[in-house]
Amino acid sequence: MNGYHVPVDRIMQAMEVAGLGELLRLPPFDGLDPEAVRDVLQGFATLAEQVIAPTDRDGDLHGAVLDADTGRVTVPASFHTAHTEFAKGGWIALSAPSHLGGGGFPGVVATATQEMFASANLALSLNPVLTQSAIELLEQWGDDRQQGLYLRRLLDGVWTGTMNLTEPDAGSDVGAVRTTAEPTSDGRWAISGTKIYITWGEHDLTENIVHLVLARVPGGPPGTKGISLFLVPKVLVDDEGHLLEHNRVRCLSLEHKMGINASPTCVLEFDGAIGEMVGPVHGGMAAMFSMMNPARLAIGLEGTAVSERAFQQALAYAQERLQGRAARWTGEGPAPIIEHPDVRRMLVSMAASIDACRLLTFATAIAGDLAKHHPDAEVREQAQRRADLLTPIAKSFPTDQGVRNTSIAVQVHGGMGYVEETGIAQRYRDVRITPIYEGTNGIQAIDLVGRKVAKDQGAAMETLCVEIDETVSRAHAVAGLERAATALERALVALREATAWVVDQGGAASADVLAGATAYQELVGAVTSGHLLIRMACEGSDLDKARATVFAAEHLDRVALLDTVRMGAGTLAVGLGLA
Ligand SMILES: Cc1cc2nc3c(=O)[nH]c(=O)nc-3n(C[C@H](O)[C@H](O)[C@H](O)COP(=O)(O)OP(=O)(O)OC[C@H]3O[C@@H](n4cnc5c(N)ncnc54)[C@H](O)[C@@H]3O)c2cc1C
């Protein structure tokens, strides 16, 4: 079984627990109700199941191909059909404001469609993820001309967007970017330099590509403070958007990767390519962050999306594969392996993790929606703080879980998991990039302990902890959730203790805190998503309660041990013989 069925009910349930109702009561969403949201999701589900998912295996087998003579990249023909249907449906503009020609839906609804797209075909989904992020950037930072010329065509789905940060010596350290921008006589800029790993940096799905590129203008300060942002089209255009000549940007090579084979990962050479500045001079990082934050959320949900697809495959395999005897199996001959308790353990473990990760993603997206759309400025500010706090967690926790869950799905398949034929190995290969790109999960952890926790002395985290206190109290009173409530309570004590320690030690300025940052991030991820899962179970079915109990036992009990957070830099150095 390699198909994909969208769990629309589960997605709706998670959205409602994460706060969809409150969001739909805000003025910009007048006239929208949960049923209208469900209809939209159902519409996209049909596209995901019937049009996008069938292209996934094709992409894995055939990948993207570079013609080294022309620098042109082609992707499988099936991708063209899927992309055309996606563009025709106006899906890319689902959450863009109506005055720009968008659908006016909350961002969380677009987030849910992104999950479906990534489950259906992760490699192809990266194209709209980057375009969507470019749209958010140009909505905020583009001038009228850039919005009329480029943003409009991105929203129409006729052009696509890319994000160009990484260079050979500038990976996690973006401040090391060397690409230059020289002013031209007509007020534009000539961009020169080499960018690597650029996702969908060249392709034949659309006639033009809008590259958003970080570069340095002459005489600026070193580091991130001297970086500006430029819009560099693949093909130059006139003021009406008619295509002129090819710009001086070329794909030199494509990376050969362990997964997402059909997502062209390009080395791009900019050789005096003509571009225009977006945002203020030296304001490139601030502008790029308005693209990176939505991209981080979108990458985070890829962990959930690929886990969901892997879970469905593993469940179907477990129902079909016959092996051994099982205590309660009354049929003739060997039992389907789903009858074995250990196989059930693996499947439920994945299902619980997927629900928890999905809730975390939606809660982060809804915080972003409230920060944008709430009429009360104070609520907007609080929501922004929540979105900022949750972004590194929503990027890291589901992607780490994605690697774990797809590994479990391979295990459910036994030997057939390790051969390519069943298609489950592709999930494991595909998802492995997600903890790496868009800022490695290690870099997210540094952001969390520094900018998100120590900077406000743990205030935003404590506001979240107070909400978790409420979940603990509620869950203690619900039959069937006793064990989960106790585990959450213990993990919350650990989280408060760890947060106080991170703040006392001075956050990212302390080598000891940096040594424990990833463990702290894991603790926050487990507690936050566990709290949402338990909250869902308080009002939920027996299935919800069982999943909350499994998640609590597997994740919350483990992170309640603070030793890894407070391990200390010295222990790590001695452990490597470097002290
Ligand atoms: C398939 C793919 C697609 C990509 N798409 C894009 C794209 O579209 N646009 C784009 O600009 N980039 C893209 N990237 C680049 C990606 O974002 C980087 O690979 C990533 O940010 C890590 O940088 P790096 O590879 O240079 O690793 P490095 O920075 O060399 O990191 C190596 C290891 O060291 C750790 N590390 C580094 N610095 C620190 C530090 N200060 N503290 C603690 N640990 C540290 C990292 O966490 C990591 O574990 C893509 C990469 C891949 C593989």
Image (cartoon, grey):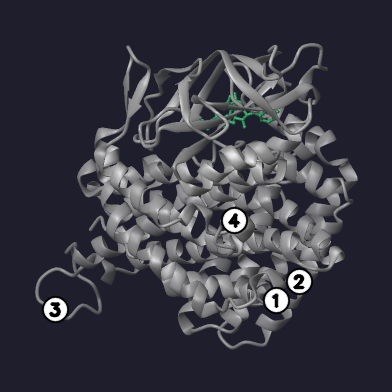
Are discs 2 and 4 less than 8 Å apart at CB?
A: no
Label 3 is placed on what type of residue? Answer: Gly
How many dots with numbers? 4
Q: How far apart are marks 2 and 4 (CA)?
A: 31 Å
Q: Distance between the residues labelled 1 and 2?
A: 7 Å
Label 2 is placed on what type of residue? Answer: Glu
Which mark, by number, is residue 467? Answer: 2
User: Which class describes the residues within 10 Å of circle 2: few (<14), some (14-19), or many (20+)?
Assistant: few
Element carrying mark 2: helix
Are discs 1 and 4 less than 8 Å apart at CB?
A: no
- Residue 242's x, y, as percent? 48, 31
Label 4 is placed on what type of residue? Answer: Ala
Name the residue tied to disc 3.
331
Q: Which of 467 and 391 is in front in this view?
A: 391
Residue 561 seen in render: no
Name the residue tied to disc 1.
471
Element carrying mark 3: loop
Q: Distance between the residues labelled 1 and 4?
A: 34 Å
Q: How far apart are marks 3 and 4 (CA)?
A: 54 Å
Name the residue tied to disc 4.
96
Label 1 is placed on what type of residue? Answer: Thr
Element carrying mark 4: loop
